Amino acid sequence: MTRRPTLSELKRAYQELTSVKVSVLSKETLERRELAEQEALEKAMELSQSRTAKEKDASKKISNEPIVPEPSPELSKLIDLVKKGRAEAMSSHLLKHGIDPSMLLPLTSSSEYDVRRTPTILHLASHHGQASVVKILLEKHMADPTMTASSVVESHQDPETTDGDTPLLGTSSFTAYDIAKDKETRNAFRRSMALLPDAWDWVGQAHVPSALTPEMEAEQERKAKEKSRKLQEAERERKKTREANRPITPAGQSSTSKSTSPSSSSVMAKSLASVSAANSHLSPEMRMRLERERRANAAEARMLAQRQGESIRRAVQEGKNVCVACGKSLDGLSPFDKFGRKFCTTECVARGPA
């Protein structure tokens, strides 16, 4: 259906519009129409008056609300430095302008949601996963880790108009540790707890479960290395088992196996046949010597690969921004992320971590 009028419909509509019709109405009908029109007019007037009264009440409420100023340029710059993770610049900015790190951020209409979630600089750094900023705030500037998100609303609430027993809507009791983005940020709180155990109520009010000492970190690193070493040994044993169970095609049957076996098996059989043919004229002692040299070269290559893998894992544990497969620096690159590990190319992703 096109929903377009036909020619006959157009003619009918034209006839209706251009024809004059005379209707004879009784006096009662005219009175009913006038009464209905008067009632509709009165309802429209009442609705208009009620709307005007509501607008006046709303304007009075808005005028009575206190105007909260926007953050100062110094505070805005501090927030930007915290979000970018520039710890040293943030520390110098705090000392230069005398800003209290435990100060509540201003609650404005444009940032009300963010401030309810991150009311202090420490909350902001923890929420964005800036572990170095968290460390400096706690250990150098003595930021309070026990402050919660509800404090910012309580500070802006009018005590005369607020009932003390009424809970504040839209607030929460999250500390900076509760909203930490990742494990490294949480470890920054635990290290500060180990360094300053009596400064705050870490467990009760700051919600930090336990301290993290250098000895504990060294033990965790040792266990991680031991686990990695066992996994590598198990992988090497599996490779040896697969190589030992792999069938070796004789040189005389290489031509027949070429047509029946897969391409990889035919290539391996061909290479073995060529090696056997090349060593057929050598004495048994010379063949043994070549075999020892080949095994020594293979062992040296494995040891080199193992050392490279250990150096790459050490760099990753130290927090360096490198590829976990080849150790290449990822500065200025857009790395590939797989299961929390970063790679520089798709080839490294396929090869896996060292």
Image (cartoon, helix red, strand yellow):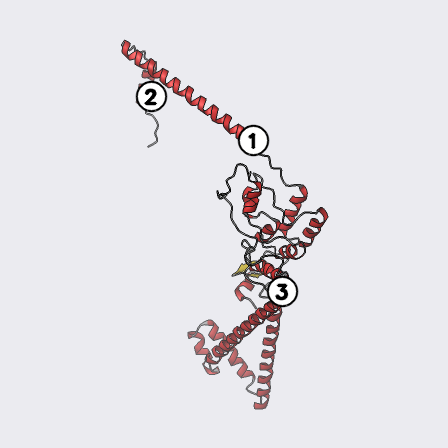
Q: At 39% from the left edge and 18% from the top edge, which residue is drawn?
A: 42
Q: How many marks?
A: 3
Mark 3 and mark 1 in contact (Cβ < 8 Å)? no
Reply above or below: 19 against 156. above
User: Which residue is under mark 1?
Assistant: 64
> Would you place residue 192 above or below residue 229 in this image?
above
Q: Which one is in front, 279 or 348?
A: 348
Q: Of 143 and 214, which appears nearest the observer? A: 143
Residue 54's label in the rendered image is none
Q: Taking the image as drawn, is residue 24 in sight?
A: no
Query: Front-most of 48 and 198?
Result: 198
Q: Quadrant of residue 184?
A: bottom right
Residue on which the image places disc 2: 10
Give the SS element for disc 3. loop
Q: Position of residue 314 (x, y in %)?
A: 62, 68
In three-dimensional space, the C-alpha distance between marks 2 and 1, rounded to whole angstroms, equals: 61 Å
How packed is label 2: few (under 14 Cα within 10 Å), some, or many (20 or more)? few
Quarter of the picture containing the N terminus is top left
In space, the residues marked 1 and 3 are separated at their CA atoms by 55 Å
Label 2 to label 3, Cα distance in Å?
83 Å
Q: Which residue is mark 3?
A: 318
Q: State the SS at label 1.
A: helix
Question: How far from the left and from the top, in percent, is residue 278?
Answer: 56, 83
Instruction: Choose the circle earlier in sequence order: 2 or 3.
Output: 2
User: Alpha-carbon neighbours of circle 3 within 10 Å: few (<14), some, or many (≥20)?
Assistant: few
Please name the amino acid that badge 2 sits on: Leu
Residue 217 location in percent, x, y? 59, 67
The amino acid sitting under disc 3 is Glu
Crowd around label 1: few <14 · some 14–19 · many ≥20 (10 Å):
few
Q: Is residue 97 visible?
A: yes
Residue at horizontal 50%, vertical 40%?
163
